[in-house]
Amino acid sequence: MSKILITPRSLSKGNHPDLEPLRRAGFELVMPTPGATPTEVDLVKALPGCVGWLAGVEPVSEAVILSAKDLRVISRNGTGVDNLPLDAVEAAGIVIQRAEGTNARGVAELALALALAGLRNMVPTHTGVKAGDWPRRIGSEIQGAKVGIVGLGAIGATMAELCLAVGAHVYGFDPYAPDGVVTHPAFTRSGFTSAIAGAKVLSLHAPMQKDGRPLIGAQEIAALGHGGVIVNTARAGLVDEAALLEALESGQVSSYAADAFHTEPPELTALLRHPNVIATSHIGGFTDASVARSTRRAVDNLLNVLVSDAV
């Protein structure tokens, strides 16, 4: 029986109903680390004999791909492939499939929630009340505020629509998104610098730059409106952490909210320990609806490749 590796944490306990089409098609499902992120050793051990891989965001090394002698397709249950060694995958002749847009609503809703939490100082206020204090920090409303969005793919465009729905003025930057990706009187398609300048909220929905440098450094942070909120549900490396910590200390940034980290669980750095940092455990697409949509698409993509190969 041919095998398919299942590694997303939301699926690897094996009981998700949308995995059943794979079993009905005659595949054995391999889940080496139920509910947890597999290591390189786990993957190298599990991949031999697997023709398909329903993959999550776990880091994948070239050594892992070299061990996958039978693998024909990697099907992501999301959009990003930053975790894959793309040159090695291409050299091995392995097809990559993505479940594009399926978790956009879940991630965008979390991004909006984090933006609102930052604007209203919810985390330090919550912490203070739980400690027996009565902190009352004046907050800001999103209605009428400038929201800069970097990246207008499915997630960024959905975030733009949500912010527009609550009365924000949205400036969106994306050199690759099609014309008309967002249409609204309060939406402006702008350059990178214009999207950031004076923004009360900056929401990041972009891939890493090819050279690995942060997209948001000291200069970009200084261009935000004073006391701005930065929301990062995309990639930890998009923001220069040293510059961000300095901006949090000075008040130039009032809140930083992150749902993506270099390693997961993350090291508790000085940045993550800062009282004005909101950290969530990579839950953007972890809703029942997003998981179901992503799983169905990823399963369909696997079957489309593997069944057509068998015909």
Image (cartoon, helix red, strand yellow):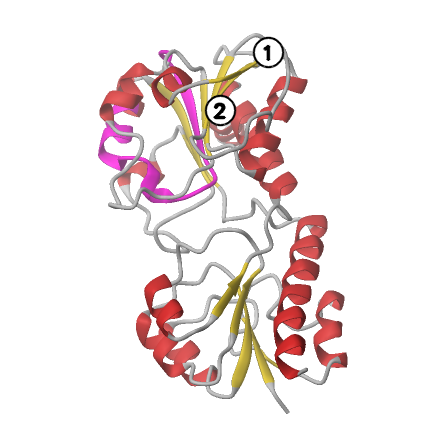
Q: SS for tag 1?
A: loop
Dot 2 crowding, Cα within 10 Å, few <14, some 14–19, many 20+ = many
What is the span of residues highlighted in magenta in the rendered image?
225-247
Circle on res. 11: none
For the C terminus, the image quarter is: bottom right
The correct choice, above or below, for 195 with respect to 270 in the image is: above
Residue of label 2: 118
Residue marked by disc 1: 186
Residue type at mark 1: give it.
Ala
Picture layout, residue 292 above or below residue 250: below
What amino acid is at disc 2?
Answer: Gly
Q: Quadrant of the N terminus?
A: bottom right
- Check residue 207 for magenta coloring: no
Give the side of residue 66 with respect to residue 282, left or right: left
Image side of residue 136 versus residue 184, left or right:
left
Q: Choose the circle earlier in sequence order: 1 or 2.
A: 2
Q: Residue at x 64, y 48 (%)?
A: 102
| Point 56% across, 67% down: residue | 35
In this view of the protein, which residue sits in the foreground, 228 or 3? Answer: 3
